[in-house]
Amino acid sequence: MILDVRDLHVAYGRAEVVHGVSLGIAPGTIVTVIGANGAGKTTLLNAVMGLHPSRGQVLFEGRPVPESVEARLAAGMCLVPERRELFAAMSVEDNLVLGGFLRSADERRETLEEVYQRFPRLKERYRQQAGTLSGGERQMLALGRALMSRPRLLLLDEPSLGLAPRIVRDILQIVADLRRIGVSILLVEQNARAALDVADEGHVMELGQLRHSGPARELAQNPAVIETYLGFHAA
Amino acid sequence: MDGTILLFLLQDGLTNGAVYALLGLAMVLVFAVTRVIFIPQGEFVAYGALTLSMLDAGRFPGTASLLVFAGAAAFLVELWGLRHDLTAARLLRAVAHYLLLPALVWGAVWLLMPAAPGQFLKILMTLAIVVPMGGYVYRIAFRPLADASVLVLLIAAVGVHLAMLGLGLVFFGAEGLRADPVGGDGFELGPLLVTAQSLAVYGVTLLVMIGLYLFFERTLMGKALRATAINRIGARLVGIRTALSGGIAFTLAAAIGGVSGILIAPMTTVYYDTGFLIGLKGFVAAIIAGLASFPGTVVAALAVGIIEALASFFASNFKEIVVFSLIIPVLLIRSLASGPGEEE
Amino acid sequence: MRMMLSSRRLLPALALILAVFPWIPGVPAYWVTLANLIGLASLVSIGLVLLTGVGGMTSFGQAAFCGFGAYTTAVLSTHYGVSPWLTLPVCLLVTGVLALPLGLLTVRLSGHFLPLGTIAWGLALYYLFGQLDFLGRYDGISSIPPLSLFGHPFYSDQDIFYVIWAFVLLAAVAAGNLLDSRVGRSIRALRGGRAVAESFGADTARAKLTVFVFAALLAGLSGWLYAHMQRTVNPSPFGLNLGIEYLLMAVVGGAGHVWGAVFGAGLVTLLKDVLQRILPVLFGGSGNYETIVFGALMVLVLQFASQGLWPLITRRLPAPPAKARVGASGAATLPRRQRRPAGEALMAVEAARKAFGGLVAVNDVSFAVRTGEIVGLIGPNGAGKSTTFNLISGATTLTAGAIVHDGIAMGAVQPRAVARMGIARTFQHVKVLGDMTVLENVALGAHLRGSAGVARSILRLDRAEERRLLAEAATQIERVGLGELMHAPASSLALGQLRILEVARALALDPALLLLDEPAAGLRHVEKQALAALLSRLRGDGMSILLVEHDMGFVMSLTDHIVVLDFGTKIAEGAPAEIKAHPAVIEAYLGGAA
């Protein structure tokens, strides 16, 4: 397991929103957590990254994760948050360069080339301000910035949010491709069908707990899973 | 008013404006990185000017002792912050940064003083005393409030202003001081005498502006500082230690303040509270430029200097009133442009 | 609210202590002098607590208003020989008249620009006091006559002590009364609840101006007293440093507590006195060394007790006696809107369009809500639901198209006007005022059903109306089933209860149409069921409801009619059963990777 989360509890003040979640990610696989708004998915990811304090165990590559966000980043974890959190008033290239803030100048240069190869669109727009990009390009930039840190585990929070269906497909294709270069992925999504299509394994989260777990293909056929999203069976 | 007087006024305004510009630049820098509206920026000017003047007068500058106190206070705050995860390495770093460094500066000043050091060395000593204070001020007052609103940070800044003003009085006393004039003659330009001192002011302002521009646009650390201001969460997610950014910004601000103080020390008599008014005028300029643009701040600062010079000619008694009233319409326009500032 | 309760308990005790204080044997005369200084500072800081702590407007410039009061009486009583008592109304008038334009300017400043603005005019006014010839420039004006009563002049500190503290108690009571009223609720909504107040018809810009002028008048009063106590004025006590000190008192005392203001004024004044005696001995020389401690105190309080020190003290006091219960019955009730029969046309959205720059968020959407029905507006993330909702609630203006309610086109109206048309809303991200009780929160919803203004509130002439408003609020709270929690602070409620509280608040407007913005978001299953039951009961009472919702199960089981948006366009409309089977809807929800 590259990531092993054991009995994780997360609370905001006195209100606990994640109640004892356990999940594991095998190296080179995509695991998705799907669920409705407010199920606690984002909180789970933030806690794994160290943005929010939590109770329980998080093991990365067999060892307990360090305390701070930057130490987890240096260890090889990287979060692409739901709101992307790009540096809107800075250029595409500056955003990418800062993604490699913890890496050496050489590594940064090398990785930048790789990212540009993976996202030719970003290379075309390297001087453009991040805030002026389209939704799909912004998501690409967020992914590219994350790759600049040379992660072995990516935590993706709703990469499809607010994107047109065609672009969602492109983005998830990119995510699927990342697996091939050995990056493991924890993908949190509301777009259940799309997420289950690319994932190896899936979990359904409801009210801070994992309700259903299993291979992604099986979950996609599970009537209870469809129920969570539409409140009725697809015709 | 004839042309010559106008020229004199313009020259005077430009020189003052250049000093205001330095302070405005520092405030934009601090605000950009930490969202602190750093009202006490002017206190660093007074500290710088008075430290240099005391060195000139052959007196041991009280600011050296103040630095030791500030370092010790910052050390305690740091210890309190680390109380849950204190490691030997962190403790050592804190000791070096907050206790050893000020002690070394204090010792160096104490050793060098009797040797009647030259002008250059005195300037270096002044900077060594004033610059580290910026980081300590940040550590003590602002880092614990890093997630507070701009408003709370502003009130805290006013508190820091009060404290620094009072400390200035303790260490410098109420009487004003003036540093020895710097060597080097000026030259005549038409009816105007351009002094070496004013040339130094223009030069330093230009250098600081260009330096800040290059730092923020060309260096990774500069970009990281900007990134922190634009999006704190984003900055944390790429591994920028936002607390470090704040410390760097305040240290730079103290450096700019100290340099400004060194520049004005020979030109005017500086009292412990002189810095505040100068700082506020730089601040008026920074606000006019939206606390966002370095070149904009310089232009606005020069305009403030010139308006002040003209006001002092036409209505000398009312020049402060004119300058401070000037900011209200600017604030109003900025408010209307930024929309309803709902629910902060 | 704690503020009002503690004032009721404190007032008689405090009045008694004050009455005997100067006569207690062994009390040095100097203590009375200090008490006078505390009283003068209290007046300013009570105003500042209302302005900053309650109203959310941080002012560093209050000392300038003291200057208005002090200089007005100094000029009138020395140059023109006007009796000091007669100058009081003039002082208040001058302060008010000068504060009004300053206030109009200041309340328009947003965020941190506002305190910066107060620093700017605070400084400018200080220099102005020092430059004007008729104010005696920096020398000021001296030999101001003392106050006198029945020919007895108040030269001593003991004499003026009673005058000062009588005004302090009056000011505290007036401030308490003002906050505990219809106007007060809109003032207390200024911090964090402006959108709510506006949605229920309160004019928050006016509320801001009201507290600004009120605070200025108290400072002006303090200045008037100061002039006749010191019997000399010069610009120095009206500068920025004192302005900062007053703010420190409010911050230390605790933003939002009237008696905290008096406490803060006392603490800072006494501290200043002690420090002014000790520090010069320590440091040698003379000077205002106390500013070091004040600055540190300010920063420490912000870091460790952002609510000020007063709440730390009240927490240790015994619990206040329960407030008189407001029942749903008994008091005369407010008139109600006449219910229309179900099924009539009520509100229609006609080809509504909203473009943000090039992005069309709502693309010619049309639908209607009839009386007595629940209409659901659904769609995937980013479909334009919230924008459509904002168009109807007046939070956003239409680019094109029309929204007609009750036969009247709403055009480009503000939320306040929407409320007046009988449309009440809830918020997606719950907006309640945490330190107000459930009852007070709901009473804010009934704002438009009362009319009492500032003067009636301060003089307590609004009590009959206030009883009716609170009774109405209580009725709605009982109606939604929160009766048990009526007097609990809203911050103690769970999310599900808060959403229901928002419904009660909306009902207090007596609306013709209820707009609910994602009412089920974040609710647990049982909470959703309770909410659904409540909404269908309201429909049974003839209420018309439009709700934006994410949760399909909730919408399907509750609504009569559903409108589906995707990418800003209406893709389907009909009864829940039709929507379930609609291919475009299934594509919009399950699509994406299909």
Image (tube, coloured by chain):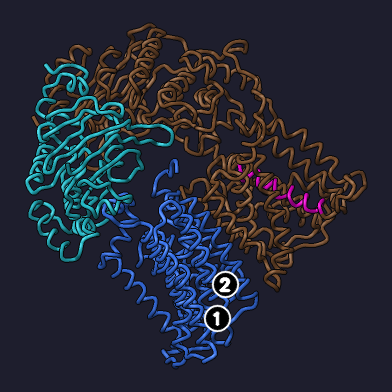
Indicate which disc, 1 or 2, sits on the residue closer to the N terminus: 1
Reply above or below: C231 against B205. above
Q: Are marks 1 and 2 in contact (CB under 8 Å)?
A: yes
Identify the secondary structure beneath mark 1: loop
Quarter the N terminus of chain C occupies:
top right
The kind of residue tagged 1 is: Thr
State the residue in front, C307 or B259: C307
- Distance CA(mark 1)–CA(mark 2): 10 Å
Where is mark 2, residue-wise?
B274
The crowd level at tag 1 (other Cα within 10 Å; few <14, some 14-19, many 20+) is: few
In this rendering, do the residues under marks 1 and 2 share a single chain?
A: yes
Q: Determine which of the numbered discs, if any, sits on residue B268 in the image.
A: 1
Residue in the foreground of this view, choosing between B71 and C219: B71
> How crowded is the residue under tag 2: few (<14 C-alpha within 10 Å), some, or many (20+)?
some
Residue plotted at (32% across, 45% down): A51
Q: Where does the magenta region start and end?
A: C31-49
* Residue A86 rendering spot, x and y as whole percentages: 25, 50
